[in-house]
Every structure is written in structure tokens, then in C-alpha cells.
Image: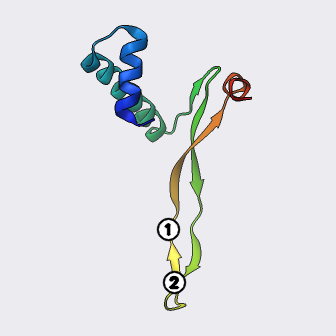
Amino acid sequence: MNKNELIAAVADETGLEKRDAAKAVDSVFEVIAGALKGGDEVRLVGFGTFSVAERAASQGRNPRTGETISIAASKLPKFRAGKQLKDTLN
């Protein structure tokens, strides 16, 4: 399912027009991203938890040249599924 399909499904499920469902879906994504950017965790009970994981700086190798390169520290989004979501899938 892509974003447009998600918007269409939300519109069908809620009875909203597609443009209103698109605003709702975009708003949810923006709020989650903003919270993660601010260092917060987003916990949706029954669905899962969005958090930020920090990856430490490390040394790597360029596979073409074999040269050692420095890989900068970075942050990445992480999602842990909740029990209810896991039970739905099994």
C-alpha cells in the first residue's frame, strides 16, 4: 500500500473526502516526524512505538579502493510494533 492508497482507504473508512483524508494523513506524518525530531518518542497504544535510534560514528572501507573512510554518527527512525498489532498479524 502506498500513500495514495492509504489516503483512499482512510477516506472510504471515515466517509471523508479524499482531500480531507489527505490532510489528516499528512498531519499525522508531520506530527510524528516533528516529535521524533524533537527527541520525543511517539507511543500509539495497541499499534506501536516510534523512536529515534542513534548510530555511533564508525570506520568503514570503500569497496572499490579499499580506502578507510569515516562514517559520521547519525540518527534513524525506529518502529517497534505493539502487542495488539502483532496479535492481528498472527
Q: Residue at (38%, 14%) from the top-left corner? A: 12
Where disc 2 sits, the SS reads loop
The residue type indicated by label 1 comes to Ala
Q: Nearer the viewer, residue 60 or 83?
A: 83
Residue 62's disc is 2
Q: Residue at (51%, 81%) from the top-left corner? A: 69
Q: Are marks 2 and 1 in contact (CB under 8 Å)?
A: no
Res. 87 image quadrant: top right
Res. 22 image quadrant: top left
Q: Residues within 10 Å of mark 2 (few under 14, many from 20)?
A: few
Query: Residue extending furthest top?
Result: 15
Residue identified by numbered label 1: 72
The residue type indicated by label 2 comes to Asn
Residue 13, x across and y down, in percent: 43, 12
Reply above or below: 78 against 19. below
Q: Nearer the viewer, residue 16 or 60?
A: 16
Residue 60, x across and y down, in percent: 57, 78
Residue 3, x across and y down, in percent: 38, 34
Residue 37, x across and y down, in percent: 44, 41
Alpha carbon distance from label 2 to label 1: 14 Å
In this picture, residue 52 sits left or right of residue 35: right
Disc tally is 2
Q: Residue at (36%, 23%) from the top-left corner? A: 8
